[in-house]
Image: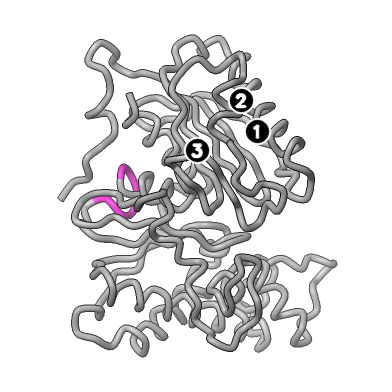
Amino acid sequence: MAATTPPAHTPADSAKPLVAAVDIGGTKIAAALVDSSGALVARTRRPTPARSDAKAMAAAVLGAVEELAADGRWSEVVALGIGSAGPVDTVAGTVSPVNIPSWREFPLVRTVREHPAVDVPVTLIGDGVAIAEAEYWQGAAAGYRSVLCMVVSTGVGGGLVLDGRVHGGLTGNAGHIGHISVQIDGEDCPCGGRGCVEGLASGTAIARYALAHGWRAPGGDASAAAVAEAARQGDPVAVAAYDRAARALAAAIAGTAALVEIEAVVIGGGVAQAGPVLLDPLAHHLTTYAALPFTRGLHIHQAHLGPDAGLVGAAAAALRSI
């Protein structure tokens, strides 16, 4: 079944309305002007000052918005969508990202709406739900009725499509798979839980595990991508680091499948770029964890939209608001 696309909800008097989209993550803030077909027609990007205070964080976001507002097409913008690391509260318009300590119940929607350049509706969406929106609209999730979309990067997030509709939940946090506990006696997580998927399967966790077990970073590059390259070359510690991450993901995916019955999983983010290094052990471990008949045979796909998924999803949320 084809996905229902946001353009179906756009105003009849505008063939291709523009929306502004902002994607806030633990390492970067991206912003773009996006048309109703999902094409990014202008963009900007800057590092996230995640360890700075709340005011500096807000200034970075507003700076990205101001760059878009300087574009000659800004007057055509009819709505603005924000996808943010979470938890978020889409009702209150606030965000409390685990990986941005200075933002706790920060009034992000109000802050952006009060900027002089912004005179359009502002919609907030969690980054995992944004990826589900994007991949269901025009990516690897299109054609499925129930699918889990994940991003495995600096953190681990997710969003759900259930029975043909993106499911955000009461406050916009449904599908937040990175903070499912899969290791009861595991390490404390910044979210307040223990043994969370994010602490085992994020790029940061993969690199940390490899270094702690004797892997030597080539040229000082201690990234998950460098660990993946070492795994391709057969380094046993690097292989073990990705196998551990894949196991954690498999346990969480199987639990999600048991709870809501999904057909497929779409995985994006920087760690997913490792390809078979991650996806092969993930498929293997799923055969163990997804044991119930209705959880077996899940289709696993790499995301199609890459680093633009958060922006496309935020744009989809903005288009739905008009």
Residue 139 lies in the magenta-colored region: yes
Indicate the secondary structure of the residue bearing disc 3.
loop
Residue sitting at x 38%, y 36%: 317
Q: Residue at x 36, y 18 (%)?
A: 17
The answer to whether residue 222 is above or below residue 194 is above
Question: Quick one: SS at disc 1?
Answer: helix
In the image, what residue occupies the spot 43% across and 54% down? 173
Q: Quadrant of residue 198?
A: bottom right
Within-10-Å neighbours for mark 3: few <14, some 14–19, many 20+: some
Q: Residue furthest right?
A: 219
In the displayed structure image, the side of residue 110 where residue 77 appears, left or right: left
Residue extending furthest toward the left: 1
Q: Name the amino acid type tagged 1.
A: Val
Which quadrant: the C terminus?
top left
Q: Residues within 10 Å of mark 1 (few under 14, many from 20)?
A: many
Q: Which mark is residue 170?
A: none
- Which residue was labeled with disc 2? 65
Q: Residues within 10 Å of mark 2 (few under 14, many from 20)?
A: many
How many numbered markers are drawn? 3
Q: CA distance from mark 2 to mark 1?
A: 6 Å
Precedes in sequence: disc 3 or disc 1: 1
The label shown at residue 61 is 1
- Considering only vertical position in the picture, is 88 above or below 218? above
Q: Indicate which disc residue 93 carries.
A: 3
**The magenta segment:** 137-142
Which three-letter amino acid code belongs to the residue tagged 2? Val
**Contact, mark 2 vs mark 3 (Cβ under 8 Å):** no
